[in-house]
Image (cartoon, rainbow, N blue to C red):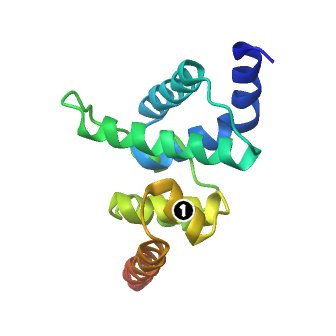
Amino acid sequence: MDGTEDLCRAVEVYGDMVYRLALAQTHSSHDADDVFQEVFLRYLRAAPVFREEEHRKAWLLRVTVNCCKKLHRSFWRRHTVALSEAIPAQTQEEGELLSLLEGLPAKYRAVLHLYYYEGYDTAEIGAILGRSPGTVRSQLARGRALLREAWKGVEAQ
């Protein structure tokens, strides 16, 4: 398989996953588009060879996280559209939850997204984010606790 066929296959299989993670990290569809393009451009340039399909998926997630971090450090960081505006919620409760998730620090958003939306376990998340599994478990617990406390505040209103 040549490079462009491999790229097309990777975009077809993993494009949605890369875009969702980029959107969750950047809170902007425009920035997520930029990250998406950068990830697959790096994939084309690097032309990595993987023993298993899981390694390809983990490589793409890791590069996505790194590109999002680079974007956040960028001098030209633009104002972003809130995630709740980019992805309209189906219900009022879902909208409130998205709003609460946006308020969490990035380290908690990343682990919560990879755990609940992408279905990774803590060891896999640790490998993707360059953190120990214990750190990931701790961040999941803290992220859940922060959401729980924030949700109680919403319900009390």
Q: Is residue 80 left or right of residue 50?
A: left
Res. 20 visible in picture: no
Identify the residue shown where x is 41% and y is 42%.
66
For mark 1, does the 10 Å Cα neighbourhood hold few (<14), some (14 to 19), or many (20 or more) residues?
A: many
Q: Position of residue 56 (x, y in %)?
A: 67, 41
Quick one: which residue is furthest to the left in this view?
75
x, y percent for residue 103: 34, 62
Instruction: Look at the numbered disc 1 and give the secondary structure of its residue.
Output: helix
Q: Is residue 119 above or below residue 67?
A: below
Location of the N terminus by quadrant is: top right
Tally of numbered discs = 1
Compare residues 35 and 144 and report the one nearer the observer: 35
Quarter of the rendering containing residue 91: bottom right
Q: Classify the position of the C terminus by image quarter.
A: bottom left
Query: Residue 97, relative to residue 35: is it above or below?
Result: below
> Where does label 1 land, which residue?
125
Query: Which quadrant of the view contains residue 134?
Result: bottom left
Image check: 76 left or right of 141? left
Seen in the picture, residue 40 relative to 112 is either above or below; the reply is above
Q: Point out residue 29 in the picture as x, y percentages from the top left corner.
A: 48, 34
Q: Is residue 23 left or right of residue 50?
A: left
Residue 66 visible = yes
Residue at the far right in the pictured view: 1
Residue at image position (48%, 49%) is 24
Q: Residue at x 76, y 14 (%)?
A: 2
Disc 1 marks a residue whose amino acid type is Ile
Q: In terms of depth relative to the viewer, which is nearer, 118 or 41?
A: 41
Residue 28 drawn above or below residue 138: above
